[in-house]
Amino acid sequence: MIKTSGLTKLYQTEEVETTALDNVNLEVKEGEFVAVMGPSGCGKTTLLNILGMLDSPTDGQYCFLNEDVSQRSERQRSVLRKGNIGFVFQSFNLIDELTVYENVELPLVYLKMPRSERRKRVHELLDQFRIMARKDHFPSQLSGGQQQRVAIARALATNPSMVLLDEPTSALDVSVQCKIINLLIRLRKELDLTYLFITHDLSLMRNVASRVAIMYLGKLCEIAPTVEFFQNPTHPYTKMLLSSIPVVSVEEKALKPTKIASRGEIPSPVNVPPGCSFHSRCPEKMDICTQVDPVMVEIGEGHVTRCHLYQGVEIAAPID
């Protein structure tokens, strides 16, 4: 479905250069539900924008449906994106001046679908998402859950094969979050969709994702199948995240890594530490970590990690 190799994104201003993505290698296969997690500013949304062809990488390769789109023009990316990729955003991203019907219809207008076909498709979606009674309402007249249903209906209007979701439930009440997640799970099975889901909620992903990828300061630091990820975390940052998850049972507590206290603050993307970018906060830091940036290594089937604890790299003796 999608595959990146050495994906890098730099943002240049008059004063500084910021590395939003640094050598990201990620593959999402057809039918997968991949969750991408990490702290604010780690590059998750930049990655989603490039995978959704809303932006282009500075360097590296990005293949979508076996086609390299890395250096395509904005117009070429737009043509390929339409009908193939759907987007669901945290803030719903509905157009306030359009009704529910018009918001859901909009992608079909861009595809230049005949009006009669558009009407039929929109009515199907409004019925499926139980929002037909709200079709003439404006977004401001809807609850958060209703707005997100409209946003999901719009994302699926063109029958995309992949849906990119950026924190789609974080703005909702807990009870509504559950309903939206159940809806997304059902739709994925019924429509054979592929999901890439950005979130901060590790507990949520444990129950729905097929694989989990962790980012930190523009780099992937661990990728694993979900069961393996929670049972055998390897990267110190992953362990720190998992040890902070609240639990309600003895069984859940037994699966948690030993509590790891967070050390220091996340460095600025403008001033990333040399060597391993996590070394300034890592409780398992070694001398090599401050000098050499580790590479991803495979430690199990589908399980890769970027940490010197699993690489055995030695630093050459300094030259006098």
Image (cartoon, grey):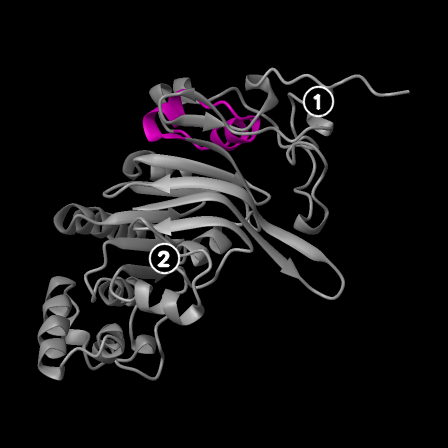
Q: Depth-wise, is mark 2 or mark 1 nearer the camera?
A: 1
- Give the class, few, some or many, for how many residues have Cα within 10 Å of label 2's Cα (few <14, many ≥20): some
Magenta segment: does it hold 84?
Answer: no
- Tell me if 245 is positioned left or right of 278 in this view: left
The C terminus lies in quadrant: top right
Q: Which residue shows up at 53% across the image and 50% down it?
A: 43
Residue 31 found in image quarter: top left
Q: Amino acid at mark 1?
A: Ile
* Marked residue nearer the N-terminal end (2 or 1): 2
Task: Provide residue 126's location: percent of width, then percent of height.
Answer: 15, 69
Q: Which residue shows up at 55% across the image and 18% down it?
A: 310
| Callout count | 2
Q: Amino acid at mark 2?
A: Leu
Which residue is identified by label 2? 172
As measured in the structure, the alpha-carbon distance from the residue carrying label 2 to the one carrying label 1 is 44 Å
Q: Which residues are magenta?
A: 224-247
Mark 2 touches mark 1? (CB < 8 Å): no
- Tell me if 224 is positioned left or right of 237 in this view: left
Which residue is identified by label 1? 288
